Amino acid sequence: MTRRGHAVQVFGPGIPDAAAVEQRFGIQLVPFTKWEMGRYARLRNLKYLAYPFFLERMVAAAGSASFDLIFSQHAISAVAASKLKRRLGVPVLMNFPDLLTGFMETWPAYLAPPPLVQALMRYEISLPVRYQVDGVCTISDEFADRLVARGFAREKVRPIYYGYDAQAFPLRSQPPAAGQPPVVVMHGSFDAHHLGTIALEAARTVVAKRPGTVFRFVGRRTAGLEKFLQRAQAIRNFKFEAAGFTPYAEVSKQLAGATVGIVPYEESAGTHCAFVAKILEYVATGLPTVCTPLRSVQGFFKNDPLVKFSTFDGADFGNRIIEWIDAPVSSWLPQAAASSARVRTELDWQPLCRKAVDFAEAVAGGRAGG
C-alpha cells in the first residue's frame, strides 16, 4: 500500500521494535495497550470477545476525516470494522485469513458446545451481509463460496489465498541421504485442531510399520503440542524432536533434512476453509507431503506429484506417510523442481499482495464488483 503512495495507519496489538517496523514499512502503528493481546496470551478467548469494542472506540477516536478505507484483518477486527462502517461512513474491506470460529468444531464439547459454535460461525459468516460492507478478501474459494451462500454478492469477494515468502523457502539442493532414519516433519502453531486423533493414530501406524522414524515438530511447544507428545509416549518406540520456537526464516532448514511433511488437520469448517501455508512451504522446499482432504487446498494440489491426500482417518494418513518413506527418490525428485516453481510463481506473497491491494483500491474508489 505504501509503495503505491497510500498513507497507512495500523491499529492493533503492540509489537516489539515498533519504531523500526514503522520506519521499514513507512506506516504508523497505533498500539492497543489496555491489555496484552496475541495468540499465546493468557485468557486469549475472553480477551478476543472484548477487544472489538475497545478497538472500535480507539479507531473512532482517531477521526474519520483522514480515512478513505478501513481494511480489517481477521474476524476479530472485522467486528470492529462493521461497527465503524455505520459510525464513520467509511468504505470497509474485510480480509479473512481463516474462518476463525470454524476451528472450534474440533474443541471438546465442554469447552465449545456445538450449538454455541454453530451460532458463532453463523455470526462470523454473516458480518459482510449484516453490515453491508464494500468488499471481502478470503483465504480460499471454499470460504468465498460460504459467504456467497449466505447472501453476499459474488462480485464483491476476492479469494486471495494465504501464500508464503518464497525467499524464505528455497528448493533444497538434495533430499536426505539414503540409510538415515526417516524424519516426518510438521511446523506451525500447534493448536488443538493440528494435533488430534488423526495425528496420534498416524504416528502409531508409522512407528509400528517403520520403527526408527523420527517425528520432528518445528514451532513453539504449546499446550496442544505438549498434550500430543504426552499421549504419544504410550506408543512404543515413538521418537520425536521438538526444539521449540523457530524464526520464520529458519524453518526451511528444518524441512530440508526431512523425508515427509505432514498436515494432519482434523475435519472442521475452519480447516476446510483454510488455505494451509505449511503445505505450500513443504512443496516449495521439495518435500513430499501428506495432507488430510481439506477442500481449500485439494483443488490446487490435486494433481501435484509431491502431495498425497489421505482420508480423515489416522491409519490411512499413516499409510500415506509410509508410501512416501518407501518411495524411491527417483519416483518423485524429477517433478520436485516443477512443483516448487509453480508454488513460487502463483503463491508468493508479492503477487498475492498486489491482488489484494488492487481490490482494496477498487473498494475505496467505489468500483468493487463493477
Image (cartoon, grey):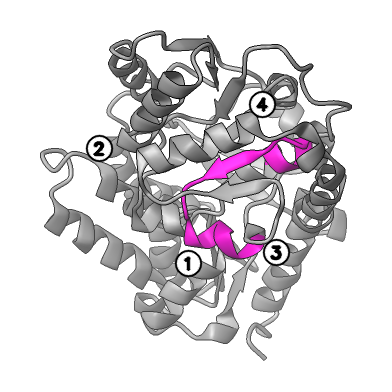
Distance CA(mark 2)–CA(mark 4): 40 Å
Q: In the image, which disc is placed on residue 143? A: 1
Q: Earlier in the sequence, mark 1 or mark 2?
A: 2
Tell me residue 316's x, y (percent).
41, 43
Q: Give the amino acid at mark 2.
A: Leu
Q: Secondary structure at mark 3?
A: helix
Q: In the image, which disc is placed on residue 259? A: 4
Magenta span of residues: 281-300
Q: Earlier in the sequence, mark 4 or mark 3?
A: 4
Q: Residues within 10 Å of mark 3 (few under 14, many from 20)?
A: many
Distance CA(mark 3)–CA(mark 2): 31 Å
Q: Give the amino acid at mark 4.
A: Thr
Distance CA(mark 1)–CA(mark 3): 16 Å
Q: Residues within 10 Å of mark 1 (few under 14, many from 20)?
A: many
Tell me residue 187's x, y (percent).
56, 28
Q: Is residue 363 visible?
A: yes
Q: Earlier in the sequence, mark 1 or mark 3?
A: 1
Q: Residue at x 38, y 65 (%)?
A: 83
Pick the front one: 129 or 287:
287
Q: State yes or no: discs 4 and 3 in contact (Cβ < 8 Å).
A: no
Q: Residues within 10 Å of mark 2 (few under 14, many from 20)?
A: few
Distance CA(mark 4)–CA(mark 3): 35 Å
Residue that badge 3 annotates: 356
